[in-house]
Amino acid sequence: LAKTTQPISMDSYEGQEVNITCSHNNIATNDYITWYQQFPSQGPRFIIQGYKTKVTNEVASLFIPADRKSSTLSLPRVSLSDTAVYYCLVGDRPRDSNYQLIWGAGTKLIIKP
Amino acid sequence: GAVVSQHPSRVICKSGTSVKIECRSLDFQATTMFWYRQFPKKSLMLMATSNEGSKATYEQGVEKDKFLINHASLTLSTLTVTSAHPEDSSFYICSAREVAGNSYEQYFGPGTRLTVT
């Protein structure tokens, strides 16, 4: 199972765009990249998922270079409520019924006013 | 989106007693549910994978006789912490994977805070 490496913490300000990069050098061909957000004492919340190139939804964009050894979560115009821990995960054997996610340490993002 | 609930959200019990935590998928069927444990300021750690109608698969180091998992239906899985001790105090989170989904998204419950005194 591929491991991921993220910065432990990041600070930014309201209204800024925040980019969090994740390294996954050992990503396998079948692996997808998924990002989750977690607030204190809450379960993680799915943000975005991708396999290659760029994926965008209503809350974020995910950029994945051609070699797929890293990915960048982009949060446009952050607000104070975006303060949370963000996890990058690489999934193995996604169609396997026992497909599971391996959680790294995550990035604690603090948004300041 | 798909909703997963957990009950209770918070429980305090005495050392030596057992506690049951329920995980329900409210608007979808889940063949697979996962149970995680999260200590303060730490990441989620997978405890076990539960498939409906079969025995759970436990991760290395997780005692299956202490953490009993039952996944009797496509919408309910339970985790029972038997003979709980203070070191079992943690945040327990379940997640569920939809039966028919082609995406690889797991839907997470809100978590259960267990405090053993």
Image (spheres, coloured by chain):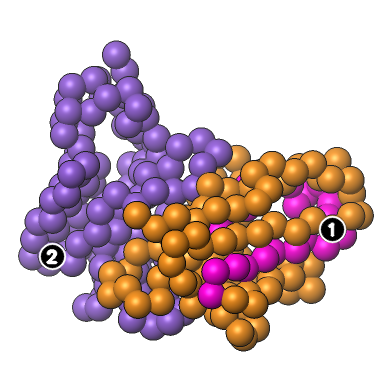
Chain colours: A purple, B orange
- The chain letter for the residue carrying disc 1 is B
- The chain letter for the residue carrying disc 2 is A
Out of B52 and B65, give the one closest to the viewer.
B52
| Magenta segment boundaries in residue numbering | B74-95
Same chain, labels 1 and 2 = no
How busy is the neighbourhood of tag 2: few (under 14 within 10 Å), some, or many (20 plus)? Answer: some
**Is B100 on the left-hand or right-hand side of B50?**
left
Element marked by disc 2: loop
Out of B111 and A23, give the one closest to the viewer.
B111
Q: Which residue is mark 2?
A: A52
Q: Which residue is mark 1?
A: B18
Instruction: Assign the N terminus of chain A to one quadrant of the image.
Output: bottom left
Q: Residue at x 56, y 61 (%)?
A: B24
Out of B52 and B82, give the one closest to the viewer.
B52
Q: What amino acid type is highlighted by mark number 2?
A: Lys
**Is B4 on the left-hand or right-hand side of A46?**
right
